[in-house]
Image (spheres, rainbow, N blue to C red):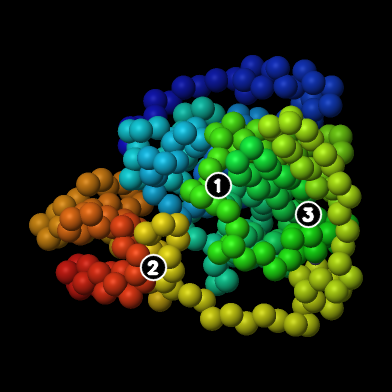
Amino acid sequence: MTSIRKISFEPSEFYSRQIVLPELGQEGQETLRKSKITVVGVGGLGSPSTLYLALAGVGSIQIVDQDTLEITNLHRQLIYSLEELGLPKVEVAAETIKKINPSVHVKPVADNLNESNAESILSGSDCVVDGLDNMSTRYLVNRACVKLGIPYIFAGAIGFEGNVSVFDPPETPCLECVFSGLDDASLPTCATRGVMGTTTGLIGLIEATETIKYLTGIGEVLKGKLLFCDFKEMSFNKIEIFKQPDCPVCSKDSHTVKEVKKPKHTWLCGRNTVNINPPKPMDIQIEKTIEVLDREFKVIRKSSLAVIFRYNGDVEMSLFRNGRMLIKNVDDEEEAEKLYRKVLEKLGL
Ligand SMILES: [Zn+2]
């Protein structure tokens, strides 16, 4: 990663074209500067929304994503470029944000949200912005947001369609009230249905706009409404959505039913990629692993958060500082766990 030359600039000039907006003004700009948000997932939706929220001057942006950059991401994920293939997405995105607006404090979290960390990661955010590509993590984010009382700017996009809503119970329904019980295995994905880069771009910017409006109190946000966009017809429809009185997440007595799920450590994510979380977070000194990994395998890239190496043939591994590993080009969780243990053994961990 290249270091960024310090350039001083006048915030009043940088934001002058938006401060002049009577709806925002100096006061709104100051509100944005004091705001802390979390963007979960920095892919097709998270790239444009994070970029524009940083440019708008949201003072503190936490970005969460478990993945490394792949070639198939680049046609729509404009916060990245070809040079950064293989690197942890949040690390690259954080560097880009620092370049386009150095006054934003950005915190990269190269991890997956799960039952054991979601609340601690999201806690303290003024709102959570959806950059996800699967329902199971959205349900998790929704549960954590409802429990912590954090508004959830929800969005989803695929093909030429997308939708957006602002979930803020008890005032509004939550995700579970509107889309309950969807199983990712039966839903189309960007790999199967396909997606235009402009679709995620447009939807990502709608949710960034809703985030700015929510934070500064401008206009009316999509509370209690679901916006349906069909870009083939260029149609935008807002429908009313309603709370489910017996919603297991946001109804009054929901907290009495505590869902206890054993956290999973290993799972297939995407095609031929297995994620392995360590049983306990570790603190691996990446620099110290390079020599051993390069001797035993072939190190392709390294960064401050991860080292990426070829195990043999096609198998590519990314070992993160906290002991998490992404293994690409395996399709079997058991096999992936075997490889993971072998690597840790070589490293004496
Ligand atoms: Zn609900």
Q: Amino acid at mark 3?
A: Phe
Asked which quadrant contains residue 19, the reply is top right
Q: Residue placed farthest to the left in the image?
A: 295
Identified at 72% across, 53% down, the residue is: 152
Q: Nearer the viewer, residue 133 or 124?
A: 133
* Disc 1 residue lies near ligand 1 with CB under 8 A: no
Q: Quadrant of the N terminus?
A: top left
Question: Under tag 3, what secondary structure?
Answer: strand
First of labels 1, 3 by sequence position: 3
Q: Is residue 107 left or right of residue 297?
A: right
Asked which quadrant contains residue 170, the reply is bottom right
Residue 309 screen position, x and y as percent: 23, 53
Residue 70 screen position, x and y as percent: 38, 44
Q: CA distance from mark 1 to mark 3?
A: 27 Å
User: Label 2 belongs to which residue?
Assistant: 276
Q: Is residue 129 above or below residue 285?
A: above
User: Label 3 belongs to which residue?
Assistant: 167
Q: Are marks 1 and 3 in contact (CB under 8 Å)?
A: no
Q: Is residue 148 visible?
A: no
First of labels 2, 3 by sequence position: 3
Identified at 74% across, 38% down, the residue is: 229
Question: Under tag 2, what secondary structure?
Answer: strand
Residue 54 screen position, x and y as percent: 59, 34
Identified at 33% across, 45% down, the residue is: 86
Residue 140 screen position, x and y as percent: 63, 65
Q: Is residue 50 left or right of residue 218?
A: left
Identified at 36% across, 71% down, the residue is: 333
User: Label 1 belongs to which residue?
Assistant: 193
Tell me if mark 1 has few (under 14), some (14-19) or many (20+) residues whose alpha carbon lies within 10 angstroms of its own.
Answer: few
Q: Which mark is residue 271?
A: none
Question: Under tag 1, what secondary structure?
Answer: loop
Q: Amino acid at mark 2?
A: Ile
